[in-house]
Amino acid sequence: MIDLFDIRYLRMGTPDLESAIEFATRIVGLQLVSRVGKAAYFRSDKVEVRGDTRDHTLVYFEGDPKDHATGFDLRNPEDFDRIGAELDNAGYPVTLATSEECELRRVKRMLSFKDPSGNRIEIVSRPYHSGTRYFPGRDSGITHFSHIGLRTTDAGRDEAFWTRIMNARVSDWIGDAPLLRVDTAHHTLALFPSPHPGIQHINHQVEDVDDIMRSYYFLKEKGVRIVFGPGRHPLSSAIMLYFEGPDRMVYEYSVGVKHIMPEQEATYRPRQFPFENESFCMWGSKPDLPEFRADGEGGADADAAGRRAGLRSVI
Ligand SMILES: [Fe+2]
């Protein structure tokens, strides 16, 4: 079992680095902390929230927009020496990073492998912290980076990978998509069925509901495509807003995500929700996201989609 602590960073290619920087800072509200070669590093975490002074949470680099990596750090850095063999033995060949690759990620050590869907996963040891505090690119109210939607080509298979080889636990299912926690937050990873791998959405938590609504009007005024919300997720209880960024990457702001505390772990039971709009939003907002729609390309629960189509033709 590999005891992950949290997602440490995301790395994403983009053909237009300058536009991605503009969007990340002036629209999302991240802080541009450095530029190294053809890569830009962003930070999003207020130290008061998690006591975290992490060096960065997101990197855009000039490259293929389908080239995504998710970096996790370990609860115990000394586990790093054994997990490579553990992954190799489980059938996931591991590549150990060179010192140059580690320096680019601002970590002491790093290994990478592909999850069963082909998502590039990096596990790091002793990632760098920063001596300077977070200063946002705009007043969006972001308190910290929180979770991602990760694409899966087989949700059941990947759920088994993340819960058996890794320490993730299922918090709830929506259709076939498991929402997985590694810490107390309801989900750190949400595996959404998709024809291809990749990061599906990126969540940042904001301070309160006012930030969600302020951003809703701000994004509309800036001509940013809002793809879901404002609304409230029944699964995690979070109030949310989703919008489209560079290379059609979806960003989410949310507030009020449910936590499952250590003393609740023993008795917590994951719940199954149907793959329906009402399971995504209890206020009635309808997602304009294929992976969140029963009739979309995601096909997260093809049977349910079929049943619903049948039902619609009857009533
Ligand atoms: Fe989300």
Image: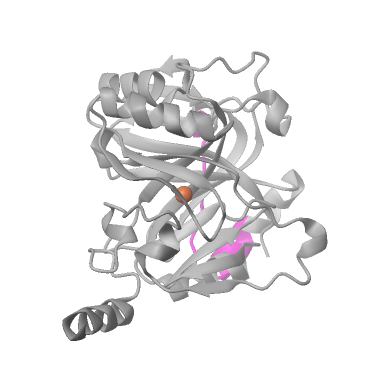
User: Residue 3's x, y, as percent?
Assistant: 69, 56
Quarter in which the C terminus is drawn:
bottom left
Q: Is residue 126 visible?
A: yes
The quadrant of the rendering that contains the N terminus is bottom right
Asked if the magenta segment contains residue 196, the reply would be no
Query: What residue lies at 31% left-to-right and 25% top-to-bottom?
Result: 20
Residue at horizontal 76%, vertical 55%? 261
Can you name the residue that lies furthest to the left here? Answer: 313
Residue 230 is drawn in which quadrant?
top left
Depicted 114 relative to depicted 176: above or below:
above
* Residue at x 44%, y 22% (from the top left corner): 29
Instruction: List x then y, in percent, for residue 294.
Output: 29, 68
Residue sitting farthest toward the front: 315
Quadrant of the rendered image containing residue 132: top right
**Magenta-colored span:** 84-101
Residue occupying image coordinates x 25% and y 41%: 248
**From the viewer's perspective, is 165 left or right of 15?**
right
